[in-house]
Amino acid sequence: MAPGIPAAMERPHFIGIGGAGMSGIAKILAQRGAKVAGSDAKESGTAEALRALGATVHIGHAAGHLADDATCVVVSSAIRADNPELLRAAELSIPVVHRSDALASLMQGLRAIAVAGTHGKTTTTSMLAVALSELGLDPSYAIGGDLAGPGTNATHGEGDIFVAEADESDRSFQKYDPEVAIVLNVELDHHANYASMDEIYESFETFAGKIVPGGTLVVSADQSGAVELTKRVRDLSSLNVVTYGESEIADVRVHKITPRGLTSDVTVILNGKFLTFAVSVPGRHYALNAVAALAAGVALGIPAHNLASALGKYTGVKRRLQLKGEAAGVQVIDSYAHHPTEMTADLEAMRGAAAGSRLLVVFQPHLFSRTQELGTEMGQALALADASVVLDIYPAREDPIPGITSTLITDAAKAAGADVTAVHDKAAVPEVIAGMAKPGDLVLTMGAGDVTDLGPQILDHLSS
């Protein structure tokens, strides 16, 4: 039986309750019996799902939304200091709790698996949640995206395992004390919070150091940043390190990845034995995520062959190469990729899954700071597409940076030989793409912002 509700979380108020990370914590608390309330900028399916669980969700931010008897106010790093509900909390002396602390409190007393890395966290966490559920272990989980099957990003389970996506962007993953941690990769990102790779490594080292004594770090043997991290933590005597990947020295070694259209088969060598299982999403990077999930489950004591079979039941996460539909012979797929490494991986995966088809991309850059640092690499990645449309930068939590626009990306793409068009009016994109696309083409909407809204609109234009 999972623990109950921490006293400070009995009547929580979430500012930005509809966010991917915030909504998951709110859902688990509501399922455990807490009186959950919060606010968000706009109506959404997430807001409705929270209301269905008994939560009170206000639209818009106002001091009056915060009840006087709230036991805490939960915020993420995206909440600004002048938010009226945050100011009201100070007036009422209501404790303010960061999202990561709230999540850490929900893990207490459970066997936690924390999944970290610059890319692939949501997919790998989801694979574990689905596989463990399939095996009847009824885990709790908190993920940064909605599972395609259950259609939710979080749930309270009655089992003793809690699977959580661990966010390095603001160092909040250092709050957790997992029994097993996964590090998929270590790269420089989140430039507003990290000035150098040394700072990134230090942050991941701290995360690894929080693994409970006798616990396990599952880490890539292929990616250079992860390999460097492994060197840095090998001397932690209380830590078991298990490497995975295609490297000859990996503890869980990938022997072969066999693409099968939009799926693949993966064969690994584990404890000297061959083990083959299916992965329902295309691309080498997703296959490697599944191997990381397998290694983590084995570290918890779950039989490898059972876990491998259960991983085959994973059917994807919304926005992770999610098929939105088909019209006029054109498939429209949605990708959350927003970092050059992710973009390249998803574009290569789609190339491999649909050989002979034209690949058209609608890319929306995410964050001014990321575009400033990585705009050239983003443009170079788009050269993998047959043609691309690039939107203006989605600001999210950031204010504009003078001189930083999506032109950085389009210029780099053109220099790399890409066919790229800048479209500044998002509403015009469906008509533009419908005019470009031909039967047999694949259209990929890509980015971490609201570019995802364009998929259904493109399908409508293709159908008309």
Image: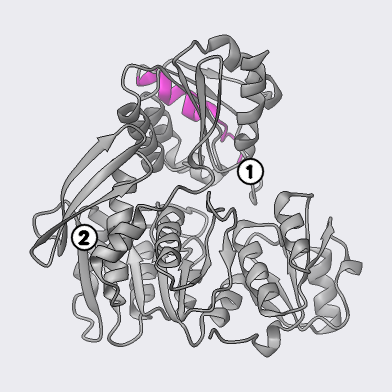
Q: Which mark is residue 437?
A: none
Disc 2, SS: strand
Q: Which mark is residue 244?
A: 2
Earlier-in-chain disc, 2 versus 1: 2
Most extreme residue toward the right, as rendered?
64
- Residue density around tag 1, few if under 14, some if 14–19, many if 20 or more, within 10 Å: some
- Magenta stretch: give its range: 401-416
- Residue density around tag 2, few if under 14, some if 14–19, many if 20 or more, within 10 Å: many
* 372 on left or right of 237: right
Q: Quadrant of the C terminus?
A: top right
- In the foreground, 420 or 278: 278
Give the percent coordinates (x, y) of residue 321.
Answer: 46, 38
Please, is residue 434 above or below residue 302 in the view?
A: above
The answer to if 396 sits in the magenta stretch is no
Please, is residue 196 above or below residue 104 in the view?
A: above
Q: Which mark is residue 395?
A: 1
Give the percent coordinates (x, y) of residue 146.
Answer: 56, 53
* 87 on left or right of 358: right
Name the residue at 84% across, 55% down. 60
Q: Is residue 229 visible?
A: no
Q: The residue under label 1 is which amino acid type?
A: Pro
Name the residue at 65% across, 59% down. 78
